[in-house]
């Protein structure tokens, strides 16, 4: 999101519920303070996977879940993956953000495939977190469930299937243009497809 | 995507937090968050220093052993990664970058299952120097960071 978009935004997180999973107390405290500053009143800070799982299973529906990638054994990735697979739990559709310090190569594909909305690099400053929260709030990607993946569509933009391939979705359309199916449209037909509105600049 | 995958639109619960009126502007939210974060400055700086001390102690152990020690290296990686996370929040961003370089170095050692003390040593020296960035001109700090990155990425 551009800086201008962030500057223009107004945020009301006073009724939001946020779950933070981070196994280091000092880092957890920083994150917690950031969200207190953003006006969030319901923050659940969890140092362990068990605490976080309890929160999820107790029926609290979170508006945002933030999980640390750097937990031992890739526990953060497994947590996200697990929640995305909970078909009878509303939290499976909650926006989830991973935060990561140094990432070993073996974790990169895990981060991509666990089902989080995206990964943010540490250090997490208020500015970075605000940008990302606003970004997440405007998220419009569809949710995908398959044998190997559950989470937001990993394609942020749809450019159609790669050239020369048919595509695997029912609504995939090849980027290659075929022959015209009819006469050219008139300029007035084209104009009618737009709905111009006055913009304040 | 495999055949059989389903896609559907869903309600983004966070979307209702972006409002046209009421709430707080981005500037107000940032200012309030920065103020709130300041409340944990002292314990966080103490935590950074505790992690640095542990890194230095592990360095001494690695120097004495002069051998690949997976456990010590893993502990060093974890401590350095915590410095990565916390340094930049309170004006120690360059310290965080040096710690990131140490993570990269240790990660490469772990992959190759070998170890060179001298490469660790220059990182420890860099961390000590960048812990007090005000004592050194920006040009020197940049040089130190560039050197550390060069050392770390030369492995492998």
Image: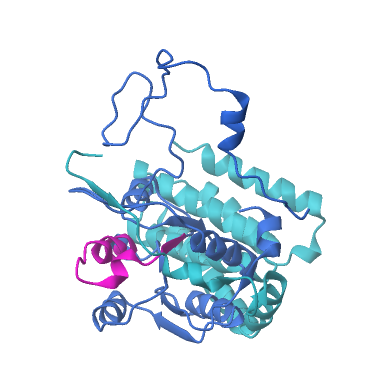
Chain colours: A blue, B cyan
Would residue A123 be visible to someone looking at this image?
Answer: no
Residue A49 part of the magenta segment: no
Residue in the picture at 69% in, 81% down: B35
Q: How many marks?
A: 0
| Closest to the observer, B105 or A195 | A195
Q: Is residue A1 above or below residue A47?
A: above
Image quarter (top left, top right, bottom left or bottom right) of the C terminus of chain B: top left
Residue in the picture at 66% in, 49% down: B145
Residue B111 at x, y = what percent? 35, 44
Q: Is residue B152 above or below residue A57?
A: above
Residue in the picture at 65% in, 76% down: B21
Image quarter (top left, top right, bottom left or bottom right) of the N terminus of chain B: top left
Q: Is residue B112 left or right of residue A194?
A: left
Q: Is residue B54 left or right of residue A166?
A: right
Q: Is residue B77 left or right of residue A166?
A: right
The magenta stretch is: A75-99
| Closest to the observer, A185 or B63 | A185
Residue B152 at x, y = what percent? 53, 44
Looking at the image, which residue sits at the far top? Answer: A179
Q: Is residue A61 left or right of residue B16?
A: left
| Closest to the observer, A157 or A23 | A157
Q: Which quadrant of the view contains residue A44? A: bottom left
Q: Is residue B101 above or below residue A74?
A: above
Residue A37 at x, y = what percent? 61, 81
Would residue B47 be visible to someone looking at this image?
Answer: yes
Residue A83 part of the magenta segment: yes
Residue A19 at x, y = what percent? 40, 76
Residue in the picture at 40% in, 57% down: B73
């Amino acid at each position: 999101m551009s800086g201008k978009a962030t500057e223009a935004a107004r945020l009301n997180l006073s009724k939001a519920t946020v779950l933070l999973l981070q196994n280091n107390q000092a880092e957890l405290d920083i994150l917690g303070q950031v969200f207190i500053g953003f006006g969030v009143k319901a923050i659940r800070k969890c140092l362990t996977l068990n605490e976080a799982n309890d929160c999820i299973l107790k029926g609290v529906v979170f508006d945002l879940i933030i999980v640390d990638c750097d937990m031992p054994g890739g526990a953060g990735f497994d947590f996200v993956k697990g929640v995305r697979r909970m078909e009878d739990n509303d939290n499976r559709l909650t926006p989830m953000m991973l935060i990561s310090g140094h990432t070993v190569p073996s974790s990169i594909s895990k981060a991509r495939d666990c089902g989080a909305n995206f990964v943010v690099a540490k250090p997490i400053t208020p500015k970075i977190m605000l940008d990302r929260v606003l970004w997440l709030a405007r998220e419009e990607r569809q949710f995908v469930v398959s044998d190997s993946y559950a989470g937001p569509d990993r394609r942020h933009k749809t450019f159609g299937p790669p050239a020369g391939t048919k595509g695997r979705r029912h609504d995939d359309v090849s980027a290659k243009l075929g022959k015209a199916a009819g006469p050219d449209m008139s300029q007035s037909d084209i104009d009618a497809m737009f709905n111009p509105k006055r913009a304040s600049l | 995507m495999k055949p059989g995958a389903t896609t559907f639109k869903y309600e983004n619960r966070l979307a209702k937090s972006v409002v046209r009126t009421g709430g707080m502007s981005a500037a107000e939210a940032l200012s309030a968050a920065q103020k709130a974060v300041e409340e944990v400055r002292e314990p966080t700086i103490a935590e950074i220093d505790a992690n640095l001390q542990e890194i230095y102690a592990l360095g001494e152990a690695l120097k004495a052993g002069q051998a690949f020690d997976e456990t010590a290296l893993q502990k060093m990686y974890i401590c350095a990664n915590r410095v990565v996370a916390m340094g930049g929040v309170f004006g120690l961003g360059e310290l965080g970058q040096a710690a990131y370089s140490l993570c990269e170095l240790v990660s490469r050692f772990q992959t190759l299952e070998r170890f060179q003390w001298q490469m660790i040593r220059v990182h420890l020296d860099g961390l000590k120097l960048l812990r007090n960035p005000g004592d050194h001109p920006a040009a020197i700090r940049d040089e130190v960071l560039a050197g550390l990155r060069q050392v770390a990425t030369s492995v492998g």
